[in-house]
Amino acid sequence: MIRTTSAKQLTIAEFDWPFETALDKNNRWVKLSDCIPWDELAESYYQGLPTDRGRPLKDARLVIGAVIIKHKLCLSDVETVLQIQENPYLQYFVGLPGYQATAPFAPSLLVEIRKRMGEAVFEGFHRAIIEAHEGKKPVKPEPQAPLDAALGSKSDTGPTEEKPSASVDAASEQTGPEGMAPAHRGQLILDATVVEQAIRFPTDLSLLNEAREFSEQIIDTLCVHLKVGTKPRTYRRKARAAYLAIAKQKRPGRKTLRRGIKQQLQYLRRNLGHIEQLLAPIPEGQPLPLPGWLLHRYWVIQHVYQQQWEMYQTQTRRCDHRIVSISQPYVRPMVRGKQDQPVEFGAKLSVSLTGEGLAHVDRLRWDAFHEGLDLAAQVEAYRERFGHYPERVIADPIYGTRANRDYLKQRSIHFAGKPLGRPKQVTDANREQLKQAKAQRRQDYLQRIPIEGKFGQGKNGYRLNYIRAKRANTSFAWINTIFLVMNLLILERIFFGLSQCGLASLMRAVAQVWEQRVLTQRAQLHLAVRLVHNYG
């Protein structure tokens, strides 16, 4: 049987929009909103911003919620605003009082938001998540698991003793008995990774060609502003043809590449000379007649020319602080030694991960550095956040330097790594002991898997390996926001996991008592009302 439908599309007014129905309270955005400490995040976001001047700011929940939506769904700035405009659950998540058909703000505002979110802001965000995780500042009432609490009645043995709050328990654990130093608790996993920036794969030839094109654009702009009658010759057509003749080859030889690089260097040097002649009549101290972005490119291409000319003369392939992107000159090549990708282009992160799965970016640099030197600072940061040292530190062998081992030994922190020095000789007396120690080291080393999984989650699920921000400070905010989203998902899993466990234990207790038929009709009604009130 064949069924046909009309090809005429309904208008938006005729479309059946079930807006009268109530929103689903079990929606993922509603659940995530319930476990986020919005007030604490707002305090961290507002710090450092002027309160007595300037245009009124957007609400902090709207701003932070939009950033979370953007990175959780891997959207662009424009698409993020459109999604919020079209989805009522997202509008509830960002704190709007009701559904509105207009956009909450312009997409360009997200760029300004990333500029404001510095290191202090994300440190405050991380502290708020830790406090919500530990229960010092609960963002939602805990489920009432005991049956007596659900009934609101007293037990046969007398009044029940009130249990201290989570904040009191946490405070007593921090100080320890009789004011002694707090005990070591938890574990700290350390590792480093490189997050790649969204740039074109750099080659010396393509970089020089791009620099030459910018120099030609600078010459054209200066000739218009300075009203130059005869424009200097740049030979741009010949330079472009010479570049394409080599770039279109599949595997150009070494001599061919060297000849092409020399040609582009000569064209670029000629153009830079023309620019200096055009700028010579301008008095010192007077601003140059170039837009800001093009003036910045002029500064960059001069450094590119100096680096490439030095490498060409010395016939080397490396130099200090090598520029690989003219639009993002802060990006540096990171030699990682991986089989599929030996060199990565982006920022290097030094990350710490707690046993509960909360990750924090302790250090972000655009130059290569030795991550083992950050161990002491990361351990002290852990103590500052949690009030005690970790019981053990799990890290790569690169962290197991003698200085780091001495530092951890002085603070009675176990380092899960192979001991230094020559291996002990195996004898019949110590054979079993050495075998157990080796098995324990392997078990400790396998506990590094969570932080590798955290890197994989960020790169595969939230595009941590493709940072599309164009500035160094906005890239910093982009990277830290991805870790913020992953920490919020950990908080959501812990929060609703405990809530479901509490509800399950309560229902089991109710079923047992109900089977014994010890509840009166009035107590049964009271229990049903409490269940609906607490768990909907």
Image (tube, rainbow, N blue to C red):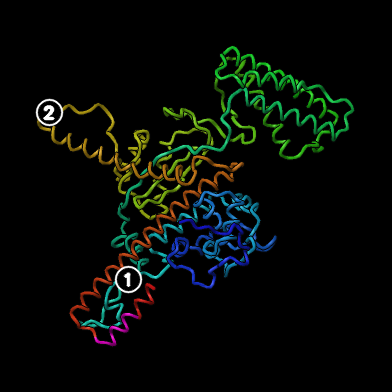
Q: Point out residue 284 in the picture as x, y percentages from the top left corner.
A: 81, 33
Q: Is residue 521 magenta?
A: yes
Query: Label 2: how many residues lie within 10 Å, few (<14), some (14-19) or many (20+)?
Result: few
Viewed as shown, does residue 50 lie left or right of 2?
right
Instruction: Work out whether residue 123 can be spotted.
Output: yes
For image coordinates 47% across by 37% down, the residue present is 194
User: For the residue marked with disc 1, what is the amino acid?
Assistant: Pro
Q: Are marks 1 and 2 in contact (CB under 8 Å)?
A: no
User: Where does the image place residue 453, in percent across and percent down from the top left?
Assistant: 38, 43
Residue extending farthest to the left is 428
The total of numbered circles placed on residues is 2
The residue under label 1 is: 164
Q: Can residue 46 be seen at all in this image of the molecule?
A: no
Judged from the image, the secondary structure of the residue bearing numbered disc 2 is loop
Magenta stretch, main secondary structure, is helix
Q: Quadrant of the C terminus?
A: bottom left
Would you name the residue on which mark 2 appears? 427
Which secondary structure lies at badge 1?
loop
